[in-house]
Image (cartoon, grey):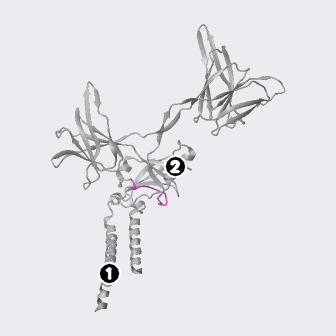
């Protein structure tokens, strides 16, 4: 029994060794590399957008052979993702804010003349407000005002828009605006915000919008020159226009094909080098055209053809200098296949070959800097594969801490350098053959030993009876 356990452990050790040879790699296992130029010093997480040259060199369907190394040749934690490319403007939003009247009070020299007794709920919103007035020594009248609760307005405030009753007399009023997060410590935001409502000869002039720059939860508005005569009916906040990540533009690969015959059917077949993440298909013709097309793809000669997109009508018409053409067709799913083919509903002649245009959004490699620079990105290997890492969890934690606007710093591809070239793209069948045969030999030997042991046990009772 100990012998069988030993054989089992030996076989497992060989399996583990073979698996290690399948994934462990160094820079020399790759076809090509590019130096990486980092946009900023001191950051830890970077992203590099993949270029067509990287895709053309990649070997594996999952882009597992795209890897980042440091100066010592050590592989860095990395992950494949969609890049954050620039930003697009997000229009400002608006929302009505709760507000409360503040009574007129005597002025204090330091301006802190109102003690606020505020009841708030669990999320910080004001439910009720009471005030206690502290008299000053000079007895001068201090104007009243309003307390605005902006705690539920999540965006930075760009402006306040005030509305008041229509029966207000013509007026010109300047406001002081302070901000606070705790209703105790106040910070001046605006000293002379102008409000006015004037009428003359049937013409009306109204200023009800106050430009502001505030992230505070609470705002205090107080007239500067006398008690406020306004009776507010609404306070509206406008947010600052913000930015959001913009989707990367679609890039296109143009493929030229040739006619093929298969089982009595005529197709146009195309070959694409590399592992581009194709999502869209389009056709380009040199002349007017209209036909229905079906697109297929596969990874190699031994694979079966699969529908890549639903049949779609493709047309292109030119008239009086204007051109009208059909839109690109989305694929059923993202494909990285090497071989593509088209079939037309209506047979075509040999001089009407279309150009197949395949569209994709570039991806990015996120990586964590470790060790010494310079860093490099290597790609193209049939033997090595990028190891799994905990970088996705790290990125998630960084976004939770810094907000959804957080994004990694940019790294750019520098000069290319040839490593093992085409030799790295050859499947490593020969070096592994002896390992495979050794493994099979061990398994067969173990099976023979077990069989012999069983036969010997069956023979012993017969021998004893003789």
Dot placed on the residue nearer the N-terminal end, 1 or 2: 2
User: What is the span of residues highlighted in magenta in the rendered image?
Assistant: 63-75
By secondary structure, the bulk of the magenta-drawn segment is best described as loop
Q: Secondary structure at mark 1?
A: helix
Q: Answer with the quarter of the image where residue 449 lies.
A: bottom left
Residue occupying the far front of the picture? 465
Q: Answer with the quarter of the image where residue 220 lies.
A: top right
- With 210 as the anchor, is 70 left or right in this view? left
Is the N terminus in the top left, top right, bottom left or bottom right quadrant?
A: bottom left
Residue 233 visible in the displayed image? yes
Residue under the point 63% across and 16% down? 197
- With 78 as the anchor, is 176 left or right in this view? right
Residue under the point 73% across and 24% down? 144
Residue under the point 33% across and 67% down? 432
Residue marked by disc 1: 454
Residue marked by disc 2: 396
Q: Is residue 285 above or below residue 39?
A: above
- Residue 330 location, x and y as percent? 33, 40
Asked if the magenta segment contains residue 74, the reply would be: yes
Q: Nearer the viewer, residue 118 or 75?
A: 118
């Amino acid at each position: 029994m100990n012998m069988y356990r030993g054989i089992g452990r030996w076989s497992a050790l060989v399996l583990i060794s073979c698996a290690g040879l399948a994934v462990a790699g160094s820079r020399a296992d790759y076809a090509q590399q590019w130096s990486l130029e980092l946009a900023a010093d001191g950051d830890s997480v970077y992203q590099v957008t993949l270029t067509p040259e990287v895709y053309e060199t990649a070997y594996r369907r999952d882009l597992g052979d795209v890897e980042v190394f440091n100066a010592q040749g050590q592989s860095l934690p990395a992950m494949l993702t969609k890049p954050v490319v620039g930003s697009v403007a997000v229009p400002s939003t608006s929302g009505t804010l709760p507000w409360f009247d503040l009574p007129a009070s005597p002025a204090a020299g330091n301006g802190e003349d109102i003690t606020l007794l505020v009841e708030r709920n669990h999320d910080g919103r004001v439910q009720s407000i009471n005030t206690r007035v502290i008299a000053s020594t000079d007895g001068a009248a201090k104007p009243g005002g309003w307390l605005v609760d902006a705690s539920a307005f999540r965006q930075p405030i760009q402006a306040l828009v005030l509305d008041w009753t229509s029966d207000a007399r013509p007026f010109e009023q300047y406001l002081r605006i302070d901000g606070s997060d705790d209703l105790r410590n106040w910070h001046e935001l605006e000293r002379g915000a102008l409000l006015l409502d004037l009428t003359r000869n049937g013409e009306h002039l109204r200023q009800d919008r106050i430009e502001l720059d505030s992230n505070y939860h609470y705002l205090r508005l107080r007239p500067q020159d006398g008690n406020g005569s306004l009776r507010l009916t609404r306070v509206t906040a406008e947010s600052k226009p913000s930015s959001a990540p913009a989707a990367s533009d679609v890039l296109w690969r143009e493929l030229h094909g040739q006619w093929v015959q298969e089982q009595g059917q005529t197709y146009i077949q195309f070959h694409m080098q590399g592992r581009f993440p194709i999502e869209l298909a389009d056709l380009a013709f040199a002349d007017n055209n209209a036909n229905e097309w079906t697109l297929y793809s596969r990874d190699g000669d031994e694979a079966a053809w699969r529908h890549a997109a639903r049949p779609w009508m493709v047309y292109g018409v030119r008239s009086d200098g204007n051109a009208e053409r059909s839109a690109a067709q989305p694929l059923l799913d993202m494909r990285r296949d090497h071989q593509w083919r088209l079939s037309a509903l209506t047979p075509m002649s040999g001089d009407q070959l279309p150009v197949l245009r395949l569209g994709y959004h570039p991806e990015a490699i996120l990586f964590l800097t470790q060790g010494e620079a310079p860093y490099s990105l290597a790609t193209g290997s049939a033997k090595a594969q990028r190891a799994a890492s905990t970088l996705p969890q790290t990125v998630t934690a960084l976004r939770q801490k810094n907000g959804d606007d957080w994004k990694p710093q940019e790294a750019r591809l520098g000069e290319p350098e040839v490593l093992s070239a085409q030799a790295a793209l050859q499947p490593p069948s020969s070096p592994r053959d002896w390992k495979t045969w050794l493994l099979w030999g061990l398994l067969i030997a173990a099976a023979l030993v077990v069989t012999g042991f069983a036969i010997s046990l069956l023979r012993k009772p017969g021998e004893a009876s003789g």
